[in-house]
Image: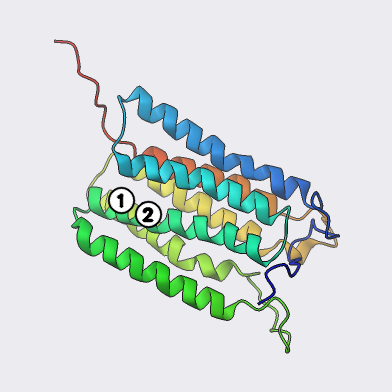
């Protein structure tokens, strides 16, 4: 595989330059902003367990990886983009399943590791920046890969309503925001003629909001002692 092969799959990119996608690049600030907001929220509540800070760190890494991909648009930076995303998804599912559903940590860790290895193997084997035969047009512009993440988020939102969890409103809002983000990601290439900037930056902004909502929903209960 040519790790330095150029990738051009978004409306905004019209050249191979570093700043060919300035809006797509800088809109990734939404992720560290979400991580910062979650950090401040956790501190106000008296702290958080280590697994929560792992989620916060991964949320910030999502922004960094996506920034790299939208500036250095080559094969290796695509991995720098996708690996933090799916690491955040897997970690969030594991933490939510352990905290909200009470599933044991051991089987969750093994399942998450197996899923991560399977994803990496499939992704590496399917990635070919210069295929001999051009693939058929994808009506979803690659957004179908995020169907499992949407399904997982919707499932936890449904469970939160069944169990009347305080975070059910936040999880429902996160699901709807993520669905809207997928729509904007999918139509990016379709509207290049009418809107050359494209809509991928809205994918970043809405995903940053979704990540913030999920992190806020995962905030632990207030740990500060109440005065007698």
- Residue at 43% from the left image edge and 34% from the top image edge: 38
Q: Compare residues 202 and 70 and report the one nearer the observer.
A: 70
As drawn, the residue found furthest toward the left would be 228
Q: Where is residue 49 drawn, in percent x and y?
A: 28, 38
Tell me the element at label 1: helix
Q: Where is residue 202 drawn, in percent x and y?
A: 66, 49
- Residue at 32% from the left image edge and 25% from the top image edge: 45
Assess disc 2: are there few (<14), some (14-19) or many (≥20) residues with their C-alpha within 10 Å of its C-alpha. Answer: some
What is the distance, in whole Å, between disc 2 and disc 1 at their CAs? 6 Å
- On the image, which quarter does residue 135 sit in? bottom right
- Residue at 36% from the left image edge and 30% from the top image edge: 42
- Residue at 51% from the left image edge and 55% from the top image edge: 84
The answer to whether 106 appears left or right of 130 in the picture is left
The residue beneath circle 2 is: 91
User: What colouring style does the render use?
Assistant: rainbow
As drawn, the residue found furthest toward the top would be 228
Q: Is residue 73 above or below residue 212?
A: below
Q: Where is residue 137 drawn, in percent x and y?
A: 70, 79
The residue beneath circle 1 is: 95
Q: Are marks 2 and 1 in contact (CB under 8 Å)?
A: yes
- On the image, which quarter does residue 117 sit in? bottom left
- On the image, which quarter does residue 156 sit in? bottom left
The answer to whether 22 appears left or right of 78 in the picture is right
Q: Where is residue 96 drawn, in percent x and y?
A: 30, 51
Q: Compare residues 157 and 87 and report the one nearer the observer.
A: 87
Q: Is residue 100 visible?
A: no
Quadrant including the C terminus = top left
Tell me the element at label 2: helix
């Amino acid at each position: 595989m040519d790790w330095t092969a150029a990738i051009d799959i978004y409306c905004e990119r019209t050249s191979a330059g570093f700043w060919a996608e300035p809006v797509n690049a800088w809109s990734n600030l939404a992720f560290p902003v979400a991580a910062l907001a979650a950090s401040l929220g956790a501190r106000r509540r008296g702290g958080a367990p280590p697994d929560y800070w792992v989620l916060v760190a991964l949320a910030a890494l999502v922004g960094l990886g996506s920034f790299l991909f939208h500036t250095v648009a080559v094969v290796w930076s695509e991995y720098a983009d996708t690996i933090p995303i799916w690491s955040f998804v897997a970690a969030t599912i594991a933490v939510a399943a352990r905290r909200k559903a009470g599933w044991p940590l051991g089987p969750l860790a093994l399942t998450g590791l197996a899923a991560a290895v399977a994803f990496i193997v499939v992704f590496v084997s399917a990635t070919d920046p210069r295929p001999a035969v051009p693939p058929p047009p994808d009506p979803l512009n690659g957004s179908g890969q995020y169907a499992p993440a949407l399904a997982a988020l919707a499932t936890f939102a449904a469970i939160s309503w069944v169990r009347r969890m305080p975070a059910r409103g936040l999880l429902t809002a996160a699901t709807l925001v993520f669905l809207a983000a997928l729509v904007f990601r999918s139509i990016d290439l379709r509207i290049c003629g009418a809107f050359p900037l494209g809509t991928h930056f809205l994918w970043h902004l809405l995903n940053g909001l979704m990540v913030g909502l999920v992190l806020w929903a995962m905030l632990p209960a207030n740990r500060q002692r109440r005065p007698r």
